[in-house]
Image (cartoon, rainbow, N blue to C red):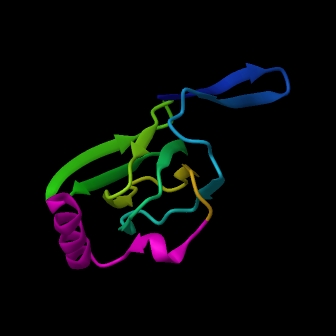
Amino acid sequence: MSVEINYQIDLNSGKLGIIEFKKLNFSPRRLYWISDLIPGSIRGNHAHKTLRQAMFVIAGSINIKLYEGDKEIFRKLEPSGQVLYIEPGIWREFWTDEPGSVVFVLCDQPFNESDYIRDFHEYIAWFKAKNEC
């Protein structure tokens, strides 16, 4: 599973960034980006029941806290070609400390509000029920 990202290939007329999908574990159906992030503001605060995502930063950096049930994982993404895969059933929160940060997210499905879990307590209950089966 990989997405190859090459940043800042210098050309005489500017810089070129390239994203190639190599062995991505899903076919992208949607791409969105978040820019002008306000330092310290929390984004995300949800999980998806079925959606897969690949997240990467093209400017600045973002801090990401992920929960798989009550297990917490922290990551920092910078524009180094790092890609964070987020499987279904993972709660995410992210923020930046740097003005001008930009994050891109590839998704395997179009937007579907019913796929979201937006309350952390509901997420924990859903996660436990899902994993008891």
Question: Residue 56 location in percent, x, y?
Answer: 50, 42
Residue at the limit of the structure toward the front, as seen here? 133
Question: Residue 61 location in percent, x, y?
Answer: 44, 46
Q: Which residues are magenta?
A: 111-133
The answer to which quarter of the image holds residue 12 is: top right
Q: Is residue 12 above or below residue 108?
A: above
Q: Residue at x 34, y 51 (%)?
A: 63
Residue at the limit of the structure toward the right, as seen here? 13
Q: Is residue 131 above or below residue 26?
A: below
The one nearer the camera, 25 or 33, is 25
Question: Residue 32 location in percent, x, y?
Answer: 62, 57
The one nearer the camera, 74 or 38, is 74
Q: Residue at x 65, y 55 (%)?
A: 30
Q: Residue at x 19, y 60 (%)?
A: 133
The answer to which quarter of the image holds residue 116 is: bottom left
The answer to which quarter of the image holds residue 84 is: top left
Chief SS of the magenta region: helix
Is any part of residue 69 visible from this angle?
Answer: no
